[in-house]
Amino acid sequence: MAGQSDSTMSLFSSEEIEFMAEDEMVEIVPNLRMDSLNFICGDYGPFYPQLAAQVPIWLALALKKRGKCTIRLPQWMSIENLTQVLEAERDSHAFQPLPFHYVEISRLLFDLAREDIPDMYMVRSLIEDIRDVRFHKVETNLEKFTASTVTWKNMSAMEVNVIRAFAGRALQAFYKHDNEQQTPDTDRTLDKQPQIPTDRPKRNLKPR
Amino acid sequence: MANYYDIDSILVEEEFVPVVFQKAINGVKIDESTEKGYVEQGSKTQLPFWLAHELHMRQAVSIGVPACFNQKTRLEIQADAACVDLRSRCPYFYEFGCKLAPLCDKSIGLLLAYAFRIRYKEVLHKAHTTAFAAASRFLMLLTKEETYMYEAAQSSMAAFKKWRMGGPRLQRASILGRKRKPAE
Amino acid sequence: MYARKGYELIKDLANGEKGQLQPFNEDLFNQVVDQCSQHYLELQALIRKMQEESVDVRETRNAEHYGALIHHLSLIRNKRCLMAYVHNRAEIIQSFAWKVGLELLELPEEVQEKLSLSEKNYFGKHSAALQTYMAEVGIDLNVDMVPPKDPYIKVRVLDDMGEGILLSDKTANLARHSMHFLKRTDAEQYIARGLMEELTG
């Protein structure tokens, strides 16, 4: 009932993107014995103490909250990997490959599984830095927007979502104005009569 | 054809254009002031676009270039597109221009594309870097569409930041408007 | 100028804050309708005049024809404005059912006051249709609009809501400023209406 996502502005709220991210898999180490769980989305378990298992993040977090498991930090969240990514991110114009939901996953783990993350402070600041560098890139790319096709590889879900509404509008406008120049009279099929000449001298602006 | 119910589509067509009547017309009072009740061929007036366009399609009027696309505005846009106050000239500058271009002056299309390309960068830049208070003067210059773009960028970013900070997920429905003071 | 009233009506709608309802402008609305009738009368008069002069109404393009055309165009322009006014309000009114509550009396008073009689009717029927549908499919479609996390949440009551309020799993005394641990689905509607706030941390 309290739906706050404004459907006219952007298609997804951040909360909804986070919800989708919760379907990604992580490795947990349970500390209890439990039969396998059969859900619509799949079967998980059975679970044995100290034996690692793959589960979706939402399940991992539910178990974690109840103190039933520890979560293993995904490999890409290791300090070595993040340091490398950050360097590569700074050196190149391209976006480095990261999990599609890296922003959401890292936030969920920082919030709810902090004691399972060694050097949590360091990991968090690396991810923040990576996000900042990448967002800066997004802005630089947006500046070069024109109506021609736009292909950016390796953008993440949240990065796309933050610019979705703006970029959508902007692309539409670029598309409209570019077409306007080539084929005016687009939605006026009725209007077949000759132009009544105006007495104004025509003067074309040269695009710089 | 734009959405029949869309408020902005309706308002664009309320912009006035200068017309010259090519036909005599009976039984109308185009300017409320005239008591004559008819219009002579060759007389000039300003009509809202929706009316001017329909009459133009039937060769009843010829359409001229409205003030917001005059030479002065064009020169200003050429000089420094980002600083031109388009809102006061026409809040629907682009949409109106697109509708008008095929009817009176095709070069308007180029002007729009040129102005948009430059002003787009300005909107992008301001939306992501400037504090709201500092941006308010800049916002006064924007057309409706530019404002929508600015707001889209701002609100998505604000929503993201709010999510990142965490906090209550359920909130009072925004549709109810601002919170009134709880009754004491 | 012709169809100016319709424009004023749309302006009235556009001046309101985006996505929020203004009081129904009955007075202006009726003025637009009157203007439509006026255009219709003048249009008829011009057609009659053409018939009296026994010119072919369909083919002739004389001064009367263009006059009638202008009245016709003004009439349908006003009609478009009226339709857009009603349509855009109806969309907001529908979303009240989704975002605030299905009963008219659940809506804040200041919102109820903004609806016209037929809009209240519309809201009631839309809600009823929604309720019937939800009962048939067996799912509450208007809860959990934000992806849910925990089944229970902590809330603070913002307005005196009275004693012995019946919730799905208990009755509660919801005095102002009191804090409670409630089922999320119970609390959601009160939060949406601004009667409670969710507490975190």
Image (tube, coloured by chain):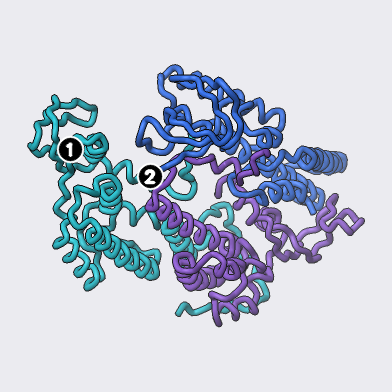
Q: Which mark is residue A158?
A: none
The quadrant of the rendering that contains the N terminus of chain C is bottom right
Mark 1 lies on residue: A69
Q: Secondary structure at mark 2?
A: helix
Please, which chain is the residue tagged with disc 2 on? A
Question: Which residue corresponds to the image point at 15% horizontal and 40% vertical from the top-left?
Answer: A28
Circle 2 sits on which residue? A15
- Find residue C57 and report its horizontal and vertical position in percent: 77, 42
User: Tag 2: residue type?
Assistant: Glu
Secondary element under disc 1, as helix, strand or loop, is strand
Q: Quadrant of residue C22?
A: top right
Do the residues bearing badges 2 and 1 touch, measured as CB atoms within 8 Å? no
Q: Is residue B79 above or below residue A111?
A: below
Any part of residue A162 in sight: yes
Residue at image location 64% in from the left, 43% down from the top: B180
Chain A rendering hue = cyan
Colour blue, chain: C
- Look at chain B in the picture and name its colour: purple
The foreground one among C137 and A82 is: A82
Residue drawn at (65%, 54%) of the image: B11
Where residue B84 sits in the image (x, y, percent)? 59, 74
Image check: A68 left or right of A16?
left
Disc 1 residue crowd, few under 14, some 14–19, many 20+, Cα 10 Å: many
- Determine the residue located farthest toward the left in the rendered image: A51
Q: Residue A54's spot in the image, x, y percent?
A: 14, 39
The residue carrying pointer 2 sits among few (fewer than 14), some (14 to 19) or many (20 or more) residues within 10 Å by Cα, namely many
